[in-house]
Image: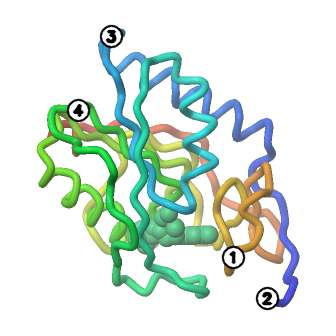
């Protein structure tokens, strides 16, 4: 991959604060004795999952599913392919999907359908980043870290051609970080049950 450089969009401290804020919202939304079953979509969600799980202050179980939709491109191809299925059954669990970013919505729609088929007690989603301007499907996450404009972002688990996942911040490939980002968290009722 040619090194196109990157520009910080959300610093490590900003991301940390926002993840703590999301954890507080999630804690308020579930009874204190609820064990949350965190399901993360590999590979992009692994950093967000690790940080969120450690500040949730709730019992959690964790599972992974691997899908691919992007390949080496910076635009979604739309076709979601299952690469590795869940290890644990989701039946009667309170499932919280932990995803890096919602773009067209194809991946989240696919994974929610897949999980619903397993009969969870409840099913909600938290995404660190939301690009609503790119949406093709009528779908929203229950908890959103940052809403961003149509920029290809890297770092904090997100890659460009498998690189840059290790960055402790969220960055934009090349260019400047000027963005219309807002730091809102929207809680909707969508997807609140299995
Ligand atoms: P869809 O279009 O299905 O996309 O909502 C969700 C998945 O696409 C990846 N994605 C990105 N990956 N920078 C990335 O590194 C981006 O800006 C970006 N936008 C979408 C990501 O894997 C996400 O799960
Ligand atoms: Mg992803």
Does the Cβ of the disc 3 residue fall within 8 Å of ligand 2? no
Q: Residue at x 75, y 49 (%)?
A: 10
User: For residue 46, which numbered disc appears in the image?
Assistant: none
Would you name the residue on which mark 1 appears? 160
Of 147 and 60, the residue lying toward us: 60
**Horizontal and vertical percent for residue 33?**
32, 10
Q: Are marks 1 and 2 in contact (CB under 8 Å)?
A: yes
User: For residue 1, which numbered disc appears in the image?
Assistant: 2
**Looking at the picture, does residue 190 appear above or below residue 177?**
above
Q: Are marks 1 and 3 in contact (CB under 8 Å)?
A: no
Name the N-terminal-most of marks 4 and 3.
3
**Looking at the picture, does residue 58 appear above or below residue 130?**
above
Q: Are marks 3 and 2 in contact (CB under 8 Å)?
A: no
* Residue at mark 1 to residue at mark 2: CA–CA distance: 9 Å
Mark 3: few, some, or many residues within 10 Å (few <14, many ≥20)? few
Name the N-terminal-most of marks 2 and 4.
2
Name the element at disc 1: loop
Name the N-terminal-most of marks 4 and 1.
4
Name the N-terminal-most of marks 1 and 3.
3
* Residue at mark 4 to residue at mark 1: CA–CA distance: 34 Å
Would you name the residue on which mark 4 appears? 93
In this image, 66 relative to 112: left or right?
right
Is the N terminus in the top left, top right, bottom left or bottom right quadrant? bottom right
**Horizontal and vertical percent for residue 66?**
43, 65
Would you name the residue on which mark 3 appears? 33
Mark 1: few, some, or many residues within 10 Å (few <14, many ≥20)? some
Q: Residue at x 57, y 34 (%)?
A: 52
Does the Cβ of the disc 1 residue fall within 8 Å of ligand 1? yes
């Amino acid at each position: 991959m040619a090194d196109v450089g990157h520009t910080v969009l959300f610093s490590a401290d900003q991301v940390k604060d926002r993840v703590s804020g999301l954890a507080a919202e999630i804690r308020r939304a579930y009874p204190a004795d609820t064990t949350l079953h965190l399901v993360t979509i590999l590979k992009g969600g692994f950093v967000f999952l690790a940080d969120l799980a450690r500040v949730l202050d709730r019992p959690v179980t964790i599972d992974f599913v691997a899908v691919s939709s992007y390949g080496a491109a910076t635009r979604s191809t739309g076709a979601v392919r299952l690469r590795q299925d869940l290890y644990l059954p989701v039946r009667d669990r309170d499932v919280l999907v932990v995803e890096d970013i919602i773009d067209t919505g194809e991946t989240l729609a696919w994974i929610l359908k897949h999980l619903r088929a397993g009969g969870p007690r409840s099913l909600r989603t938290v995404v660190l980043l939301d690009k609503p301007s790119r949406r093709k499907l009528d779908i929203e996450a229950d908890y959103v870290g940052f809403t961003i404009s149509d920029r290809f972002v890297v770092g904090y688990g997100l890659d460009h051609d498998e690189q840059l996942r290790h960055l402790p911040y969220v960055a934009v490939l090349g260019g400047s970080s000027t963005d219309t980002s807002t730091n809102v968290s929207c809680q909707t009722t969508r997807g609140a049950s299995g």
